[in-house]
Structure formats: structure tokens, C-alpha cells
Image (cartoon, rainbow, N blue to C red):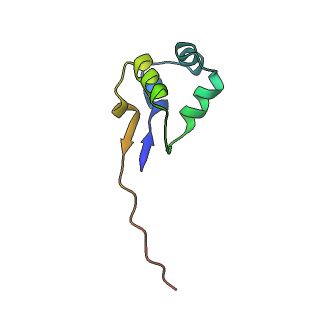
Amino acid sequence: MIHWRLAVIMAERDISNNELAEMLGMHPTSISRMKTRRQFTRIDESTLNALCKALQCQPGDLMVYEPDEPKQPKTW
């Protein structure tokens, strides 16, 4: 599973939703939605590029991989 760390990176850099939205030319609500996701299925390359540029970070700073928990067999 890939965990999204946008909220952590923003907090470390003391950047608000409004500030990041202005840097990216996005609405603050869009930043809030991206920020509150703990995991995601995909992100647009241009959005990821813009985030990395604005936050001065690498894609790996925004995402962390952790193996999924093994599924437990069903017991009846």
C-alpha cells in the first residue's frame, strides 16, 4: 500500500492549503482533498510535478510504500 504524506510535508514546511493552492493555481478545496487522503490509487504526473516543485521535494517524500498485511484465512 502506498501512503500519501502531503499533510506531513506541508506541516514540516509550514505551508497552508491556501498558500499551496496559490502556488499551484488550484482551489484550496482541491488541496484539502489531496491532503486528507491517506492512500490513493493514482495521481496525475503534472500534479505530482507541480507539488514537488512547490514543496521542493522528491516524489518519494510524498509517498511511502508499506507492504499490505497478509490476508488471514477465513475460519468458520
Left or right: 55, with 34 as reference point: left
Q: Residue at x 57, y 13 (%)?
A: 22
Q: Residue at x 42, y 51 (%)?
A: 1
Going 62% across and 28% down the picture, which residue do you hit?
30
Q: Nearer the viewer, residue 26 or 9?
A: 26
Residue 33: x %, y % from top left: 60, 33
Give the vertical position of 44 relative to 53 (above or below): below
- Can residue 11 be spotted in the picture? no
**Residue at 40% from the left image edge and 32% from the top image edge:** 62
Q: Quadrant of residue 52?
A: top left
In the depicted structure, whether residue 1 falls above or below residue 55: below
Q: Position of residue 12 (x, y in %)?
A: 42, 24
Of residues 8 and 4, the one drawn nearer to the viewer in this rendering: 4
Asked if residue 6 lies left or right of residue 57, the reply is right
In the picture, measured across the screen, residue 28 lies left or right of residue 65, that is right
Residue 39, relative to residue 32: is it above or below?
A: below
- Give the residue furthest to the front: 45
Q: Position of residue 17 (x, y in %)?
A: 58, 21
In the rendered image, residue 4, in percent from the top left (x then y), is placed at 46, 38
Image position of 66 with respect to 50: above or below = below
Q: Is residue 30 visible?
A: yes
Numbered label tally: 0
